[in-house]
Image (tube, rainbow, N blue to C red):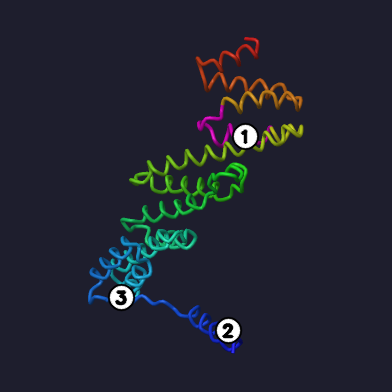
Amino acid sequence: MGRWIALFFGATLVVAGCKTITTEVDFASDAKTNLARGNEALKNHSYAEAEKYFDYVRTKYPFIDASKEAELRLADVDFEREQFTEARDRYTNFAKLHPTHPKADYAAFRAAVCHYKQMPGDFFLIPPSYEKEQVAIRNTLTSMEEFVKNYPLSSYVPEAKKIINEVARRLAQHEMYVADFYQKRGRWAAVVGRLENVVNKYPGVGYDERALFRLHEAYLKVNNPERAQEALKKIIERFPGTEAAERAKKMLGS
């Protein structure tokens, strides 16, 4: 008897697990109303409902502007669901297919933001983000820089530049961390490479002075006194009138 009860409940669980929850929506007879209903559903975090409205408009009215709006809103649905890879593909396709659309810059910016959202974060009890894989961070920098280049007059440029500065700072931080790693192991040529990246690729984010002083030391370690002096001269050029510049002058003997 116990065996049959177990089988019954097992079958019940399987059926329950296979049950699909469907979302019913009330489509209107015009695209504008359906878009409005989709927007309201998205605002209320009813993503499945919003998706149905937008997809209906996209397929039902393919030759009017509402269809393009629906394409963009479908990307927004993925974004709000935190499905950033899918959202990025949708935004990117929209910007490519509709380059003259008034919201093409929005799509391009949001595609770059999707990279930003996929960057590693800093969480307690795990290594800081500058120790982790940097691919998503580099992709963010590249995509944001491309956005600013392609849409210099966009209202999203100021926000994009803030993100560029933040991402460049994190990449510089990563290079400094790796330089520390190599320095502890006496691999001075590798130290030079990492510090040069900080100075040349990510200037102005807060690490220039420290990186240049360390470059001076690293170049001396690899027997390149000329480049060591160049590092000190760059400090004087970039930070005139500062304590760092005065220190560099003394180290140069001038």
Q: Is mark 1 on a helix, strand or loop?
A: helix
Q: Which amino acid does label 3 sit on?
A: Val
- Please tell me which residue lies in front, 152 or 34: 34
Q: Measure the alpha-carbon separation of dots 1 and 3.
A: 54 Å
In the displayed structure, would residue 7 be above or below residue 111? below
- Dot 3 corresponds to which residue? 25
Q: Residues within 10 Å of mark 1 (few under 14, many from 20)?
A: many
| Circle count | 3
Q: What stretch is highlighted in magenta?
A: 192-208
Give the mark toward the camera: 1 or 3: 3
Q: Residue 176 carries which label?
A: 1
Q: Is mark 2 on a helix, strand or loop?
A: helix
Relative image position of residue 92 (x, y in whole percent): 44, 59
Q: What residue type is labelled 2?
A: Ala
Magenta: main secondary structure: helix
- Who comes first in sequence, dot 1 or dot 2? 2
13 to the left or right of 48: right
| Res 66 quadrant in image | bottom left
| Res 226 quadrant in image | top right
Residue found at the very far top of the displayed protein = 254
Q: Measure the alpha-carbon separation of dots 1 and 2.
A: 61 Å
- Who comes first in sequence, dot 1 or dot 3? 3
Quadrant in the picture for the N terminus: bottom right
Q: Residue 6 carries which label?
A: 2
Q: What residue type is labelled 1?
A: Met
Give the mark toward the camera: 1 or 2: 2
